[in-house]
Amino acid sequence: MEAREVKIETFDELIEFLESNDLTFKEANDVINHALKCFFIYERPKDEMIEELIVHWNEWKHTRERPIFIDIDPLDTREE
């Protein structure tokens, strides 16, 4: 399969790309990491990834010091 170049310039375009393509968790996580320099630690279904990504983006947006992990809070010391 030949790789194709996709231009994603906005957060909405990123969400649209994730929703409209059949990506594995790793593929989706790689796209998110490349676009936003953050990623998921724990594997989850794509719809959950998108929901959590939207929450993460709404909280941090373009802040340079945003957490790199979307699904964990490194400052949260609670044991589960």
Image (cartoon, helix red, strand yellow):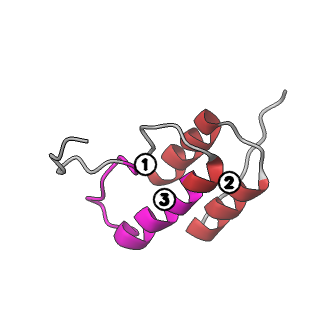
Apparent side of residue 32 relative to residue 16 in the rendered image (left or right): left
Q: CA distance from mark 1 to mark 3?
A: 15 Å
Q: CA distance from mark 1 to mark 2?
A: 16 Å
Q: SS for tag 3?
A: helix
Residue found 78% across the figure and 56% down from its top: 20
Q: Quadrant of residue 28?
A: top right
The residue most toward the top is 1
Q: Secondary structure at mark 2?
A: helix
The answer to whether residue 2 is left or right of residue 63 is right
Q: Please provide the residue range marked out in magenta.
A: 49-71
Q: Position of residue 72 (x, y in %)?
A: 32, 47
Residue marked by disc 1:
37
Residue under the image location 77 percent in, 44 percent down:
22
The image quadrant that residue 16 belongs to is bottom right
Is the residue 39 above or below the residue 2 in the image? below
Chain-order first, disc 1 or disc 3: 1
Residue bearing the label numbered 2? 18
| Nearest to the observer: residue 31 or residue 22 | 22
In magenta segment, residue 45 = no
What amino acid type should be assigned to the residue bearing mark 2? Leu
Which x, y percent locates residue 15?
64, 62
In the picture of the structure, the residue carrying the numbered disc 3 is 52
Q: Are marks 3 and 2 in contact (CB under 8 Å)?
A: no
Residue type, numbered disc 1: Lys
Query: Which residue shows up at 43% across the image and 48% down it?
Result: 37
Does dot 1 land on a helix, a strand or a loop? loop
| Residue occupying the point 39% across, 49% down | 71
